Image (tube, rainbow, N blue to C red):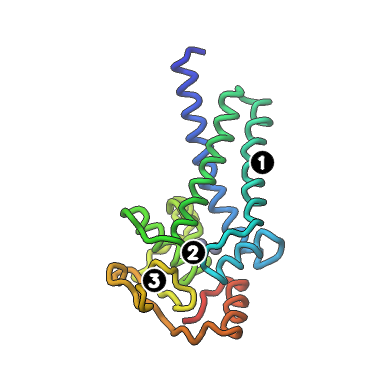
Amino acid sequence: MGIATLLLTIIGSFLGGAFLWTLGEYLLHSSFHWAKGKGFPSRAHLDHHVHAGWTFDPLITLAWLGVILVGVSLGVFGALVVPPSVAYSLGAGWTVGYFFYEWHHRAAHLRGPRNRWERWLRINHFNHHFGQPMKNQQVTIPLWDIVFGTYYVPEIVRVPRRLAMPWLLDENGALKAEYAADYVIVGDASTSSERAKAIDRARAYANLEPVG
Ligand SMILES: [Zn+2]
Ligand SMILES: [Zn+2]
């Protein structure tokens, strides 16, 4: 194999692996919702819906390990049936695809959008959190939601105040004007009681949106 062919094979397989991840992103996330809290990965994800913030949970390293293991397996076992350059590039593309998703999911919760894609990503993802938990399962692109009929573009995202991402609000707790076209804050801070948390949890585990 010439160097140009090898390079093209590596790049093509890497992109193929990243594409494979996009389907993984959709199916893994959907399955956490379908399971309604049965099993640890589903519980970990639905708890993310209850808090809607982002704190580093050491348990997330288990998810990282699992995804890396799939990537390595794609390489090791794929190399038994296709050339190693294809198999390992595929595994690398899958793994990098996952961390790309992970990075941008985390960023969506922690800071405001900086470009059109990030603006879309946040509207899409927070409609999943606060509007329709069974829609918009994919975070980075809408492809598989469109294919499986779960894509939804909201007119506006209704965010319960107790679950609002910090970047949405100014120091007085009011919605920043720059986000008023995309978001509206509903409810008041007094709903951040233990009772509200219990209701949020029950609804998240039933794939229902949190009440305002
Ligand atoms: Zn999220
Ligand atoms: Zn979810």
Q: Nearer the viewer, mark 3 or mark 2?
A: 3
Q: CA distance from mark 3 to mark 2?
A: 13 Å
User: Where does label 2 land, which residue?
Assistant: 135
Q: Is residue 75 above or below residue 57?
A: above
Q: Which x, y percent locates residue 110?
A: 45, 61
Query: Which residue is found at the position 56% from the left and 35% from the top?
Result: 92
Q: Nearer the viewer, mark 3 or mark 1?
A: 1
User: Given the image, on which type of amino acid does mark 1 rest?
Assistant: Leu
Query: Which residue is found at the position 35% from the left and 53% from the top?
Result: 117
User: Given the image, on which type of amino acid does mark 2 rest?
Assistant: Lys
User: Where does label 1 land, which residue?
Assistant: 69
Which is more N-terminal, label 1 or label 3? 1
User: Given the image, on which type of amino acid does mark 3 rest?
Assistant: Val
Residue 147 numbered mark, or none? none
Q: Is residue 157 above or below residue 20?
A: below
Q: Is residue 150 left or right of residue 72?
A: left
Q: Which x, y percent locates residue 89?
A: 55, 30
Q: Is residue 101 left or right of residue 56?
A: left
Which is more N-terminal, label 2 or label 3? 2
Query: Which residue is found at the position 38% from the left and 69% from the top?
Result: 168
> Dot 2: within a 10 Å radius of its alpha carbon, few (fewer than 14), some, or many (20 or more) residues?
some
Query: Which residue is found at the position 54% from the left and 51% from the top?
Result: 25
Q: Which x, y percent locates residue 119?
A: 35, 59
User: Where does label 3 land, which residue?
Assistant: 157
Secondary structure beneath disc 2? loop
Q: Is residue 70 left or right of residue 127?
A: right
